[in-house]
Amino acid sequence: MVKFLRIWVEKWLNQETPPPSFPQIDFEKLRYGLRPGDVVLVEGRTRVAEVIKLITQSRWSHAALYIGRIHDIENPELREQIQKFSTFDPSDQLIIEGLLGQGTILNVLSEYQRDNLRICRPSALSHADAASVIAFAVAHLGTPYNFRQMIDLARLLFPWSIIPRRWRSSLFRSNAGEPTRTVCSSMLAEAFNAVDYPVLPAFKRLENEQVELIKRNAKLFTPADFDYSPYFKILKFPFWGEVDKAHYRELPWNQDGLQSNDDDTFT
């Protein structure tokens, strides 16, 4: 009975809405612009994604680590370890991500070709440390998720009117916030912490007027933190290409006064 309930909840939480009619990004340019160690942010379309967006007040509900193609992995032992989890073609571009109900898995970048994506690049990260970040993530492949996190997320999706008032703050500020951050971002934060690469560190002033960095608790990270971090370069690949002074007025704007309502309707 418990197993059946868990499977039902997983399917319900992971149900997706249809992708947008037109993409915001040029996926072909994006996939050619990636390099191993980049963080890929996803504007998800599942019920879980909507909860995360609500809690974090951000469009980005999911984060994944781009590791490249199998032949991009220089360490033969690491490459062999990845192949144990791979059922994909050697030419496929791969990511490591954490999915509700599946845990930490290997997946193909093309899984998100119809979604809105953003690339966060740790621009100062050395080649050797990028390999270490990838190795850290690979070591976590197969790590399961805590079923209690799924229950907390499911409870958040019910209307507030049926949840007792005394539960609201615990769901939104504690019970819900921590699991969602753990689901999609904690492992990535731990990977960068492991090589001392800053994401959103705290600072402590010492008695000698010097300053030291304090690593932030990885469980507190959300996908949007990689977007917000000053240590990650943001790369965008718009559907219409780069818009500058010479070309933005030449875009095919509607001339009838229509405006979008963010739900594929125009008024």
Image (cartoon, rainbow, N blue to C red):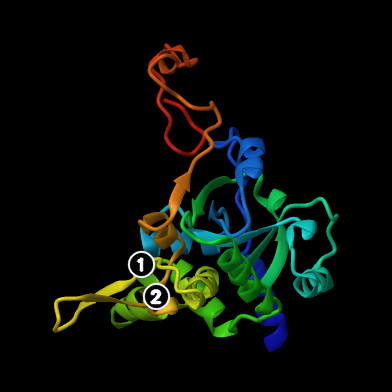
Q: Residues within 10 Å of mark 2 (few under 14, many from 20)?
A: some
Lateral position of residue 105 relative to residue 160, left or right = right
Task: Say which amino acid is labelled 2.
Answer: Leu
Residue hosting label 1:
200
- Pointer 1 or 2: first along the chain: 1
Residue in the picture at 48% in, 57% down: 122
Residue nearest the observer in this picture, 179 or 187: 187
Q: Please, which residue is most extreme toward the bottom here?
A: 1
Residue hosting label 2:
220
Residue nearest the observer in this picture, 6 or 58: 58
Q: Residues within 10 Å of mark 1 (few under 14, many from 20)?
A: many
Q: Quadrant of the N terminus?
A: bottom right
Residue 78, given in percent of the width and then of the height, sits at 75, 73
* Residue 155 visible to an observer of this rendering: no
Disc 2 on helix, strand or loop? helix
Location of residue 178 by image quarter: bottom left
Residue nearest the observer in this picture, 60 or 246: 246
Lateral position of residue 199 relative to residue 194, left or right = left
Image height check: is 92 above or below 166? above
Location of residue 20 by image quarter: top right
Task: Say which amino acid is labelled 1.
Answer: Leu
